[in-house]
Image (cartoon, helix red, strand yellow):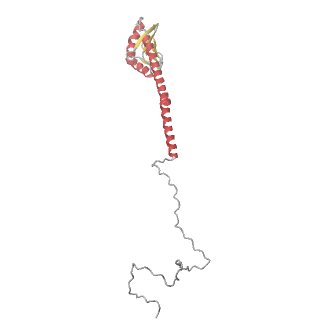
Amino acid sequence: MNGNPTQDPNAQTDPNATPQPDSSTPEGAAPQPPTQPESNMPQGMMPAPTQQPAQPPPQAAQPMPKGQGGRSPLLWILLVILILAIAGGAVYYFFFYKKSTTTTTTTTSTATTNQTTAVETYYNQATAIEPTADNSKAVDTELFPILQGVFDQNVKLTDETGPMLTYVIKRVIKSADVTSVKTELEKLGYTTADSSNKQLTMTKVGSTWVITFAVDNKEKATIEITF
C-alpha cells in the first residue's frame, strides 16, 4: 500500500481550504516559475516577422469640378476677348461709322437744298415785265399760257430785247418739259421743224420760232424764244 493517501475522486473540494504545498518541492526551496512550452522550431532559425496589413496608396487630390467654384483659365480668356470685341464694335459704330454716315447724308441733303434754292432764289429775284412790241405781245399771248401749264404757274417774263423774249422758271427744267411744250404748240397748229432735248424750232404760216431751254441748269432755269 502506497504511503500517500489516495484521493477520492468523488470528494468535494472546499473553496475556503488553504492549498497544501507540493510534497515534491523540498522544504525551504524557492518556488520555480512556470516553464514555457518548448517550441517545435529547429534551433538556429529566427521566427518569421509579423506582417502588418497593407496600407492603401494615398489618394491624389481631386480637381474641383467646374461650376462648383472653379473656372478654366481658357474660359476666362475667351470671355474677356468676347467682351472686348463687342465693346470695340459698339465704339466703332456709334463714334465712327454712324457719324460718317450722318455727315454724308447731311452733306448730300444740304447740297441738294442749295441747288434747288439757287434756282428758286434766281426766280424770286427776277422782275416780271409786260411785253411792249406788237410781235412780242402776239408771241407772249400764245406761249405764256403753255409755259404756265407746264411749269405750274411759276413762270415770269423778265426780258424783251428786239425779236427775243426771256422767261424764268422756278424749278429745274427737264427734257420732258421740252417735249410737253412741243406737244402743246402742235395743238395750236405749229409744225416741228427741228427738235432736240434743249431746243425746238417751230413753224407756222408767216412765223418761225426757235425756243432754247436751259435744261438741267442748277443755277437758273430760263427759256429764250427768238421769233
- Residue 141 in view in this figure: yes
- Foreground residue, 168 or 139? 168
- Residue 202 in view in this figure: no
Image coordinates for residue 200, horizontal then vertical, percent? 46, 18
Q: Most extreme residue toward the top, as rendered?
A: 132
Image coordinates for residue 38, horizontal then vertical, percent? 55, 80
Q: Is residue 212 above or below residue 103?
A: above
- Foreground residue, 147 or 58? 58
Which quadrant of the figure contains the C terminus?
top left
- In this figure, what is the number of numbered marks? 0
Residue drawn where x is 49% and y is 29% of the image: 95
Residue drawn where x is 50% and y is 38% of the image: 84
Residue drawn where x is 46% and y is 24% of the image: 106
Image coordinates for residue 221, horizontal then vertical, percent? 45, 16
Image quadrant assignment for residue 150: top left
Q: Most extreme residue toward the front, as rendered?
A: 28
Q: Is residue 83 above or below residue 145?
A: below
Image coordinates for residue 26, horizontal then vertical, percent? 53, 83
Q: Most extreme residue toward the bottom, as rendered?
A: 1
- Foreground residue, 22 or 78? 22
